[in-house]
Image: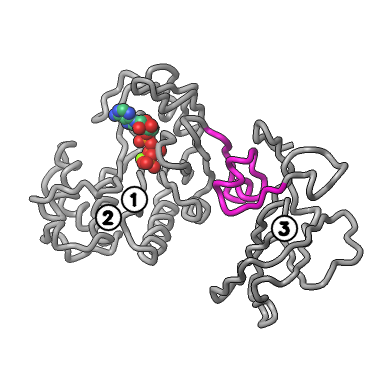
Amino acid sequence: MAAIELEAVEKRFGEVRALAGVSLSIASGEFFTLLGPSGCGKTTLLRTLIGFEAVDAGSVSVGGRPMTQVPTSQRNMGMVFQSYALFPHMTVAENVAFGLKNRGVSAADCASRVAKILETVHLAGFGDRTPEQLSGGQQQRVGLARAMVIEPLVLLMDEPLSNLDAKLRVQLREEIRALQRETGITTLYVTHDQEEALAVSDRIAVMNQGQVQQVGTPWEIYHAPANAFVASFVGRINFVDAEHLDPGGAPGQIAIRPEDVEVSTEAHEDLGEDLSLRGATLSSTFTGPVVSYAVDCGPAGQVHAERHSPAAEALIPPGTEVFLRFPAAALARYDRATGRRL
Ligand SMILES: Nc1ncnc2c1ncn2[C@@H]1O[C@H](COP(=O)(O)OP(=O)(O)OP(=O)(O)O)[C@@H](O)[C@H]1O
Ligand SMILES: [Mg+2]
């Protein structure tokens, strides 16, 4: 049975349709991510789930139980916020214990559960500090501990890592994922960082303007995007008008990821089903494991390509004539007007 079910959920703020008919079905134990640009409705969706916002239409149910009439305090959900939202005047232990005290857990029980969860999030011994005596990463571990200590049915996380530096973000996302696997807790995670979404999720819903664009595994979202929005939001992709690449072929836009474009200083022989373009390098940028090229292909526009584990010859100087090969298996076509995959 689905742990979380949203059916045609609508939420308006004045003129803004923050959720425009969202239907989602999230399985028990799943790590499910909402991914989308700023303002697409991610936070609003979490807030309607936990009950901070009432829906205008549609339904939300958790564990088969309709949530409409259930107050937040009885929804048994834990939430982790981007801003940590810790109580500054309380110690770490008091912050974590807050939800337990509200649920009438005895003081002794409370103390042992707090100690245990602090150990789980690598904060054993930090219980007597106040939040201001902690780093950002440590504060968010407290946020996580506070949400998990109540053993909620569902864990909601709203951009929990976006206030942290890049290295810590990667470390903490691995910890969150490991903890989620261990506990098996159904998790709805929000991010606008596509790499983060790909790295941690069982499935992802890509959202735009209050609507779900596609639901799929990270692999499906990256390799079989349903439309041009998903293709360009998740990872980098080139769009070239079909008339430049495949004159006489079907119309539309042809899309290819930079890592699939093959760059050569010599013309390709025997293209078979593959397509090709000729251009001149604008830049080739070496970043260690990868060389990225920007190639000016005249009327076909600029094309980005990448070569991984590059050899020294891959550092092609700007202004060099190059030949781009687009392997047929890596190509997708999209309708120019609707963005739909053809
Ligand atoms: N309380 C509110 N009053 C008016 N408009 C709101 C309110 N909350 C959200 N909105 C609007 O609803 C839309 C969705 O907002 P939401 O906060 O859900 O986006 P988001 O996807 O979480 O974005 P971000 O990545 O920036 O956090 C936005 O256009 C926002 O301005
Ligand atoms: Mg938000």
Q: How many angstroms separate mark 1 from mark 3 (CA)?
A: 41 Å
What residue appears at the point 79 percent right and 38 percent down from the top-left corner? 251
Q: Secondary structure at mark 1?
A: loop
The residue wearing badge 1 is 160
User: Is 4 left or right of 172, judged from the image as shown?
Assistant: right
Sequence order check: which comes first, mark 2 or mark 1? 2
Please state which of the two labelled residues, at mark 3 or mark 2, is closer to the viewer: 3
**Label 2 belongs to which residue?**
140
Q: Name the residue type under label 1.
A: Pro
Residue 1 in view of the camera:
no
Q: Which residues are magenta?
A: 212-240
Residue 22 vs residue 146, the one in the foreground: 22
Query: In this image, 215 relative to 257: left or right?
Result: left
287 on left or right of 223:
left
Label 3, label 2: how many angstroms apart (C-alpha)? Answer: 47 Å
Q: Amino acid at mark 3?
A: Cys
Describe the element under mark 2 as helix, strand or loop. Answer: helix
Identify the residue shown where x is 63% and y is 63%.
294
Q: Quadrant of ligand 2?
A: top left
Examine the rendered structure and indicate whether residue 59 appears above or below residue 337: above
Residue at screen point 41% across, 62% down = 170
Residue 297 is marked as: 3
Sequence-wise, the earlier of marks 1 and 3 is 1
Relative height, residue 39 to residue 273 (above, below): above
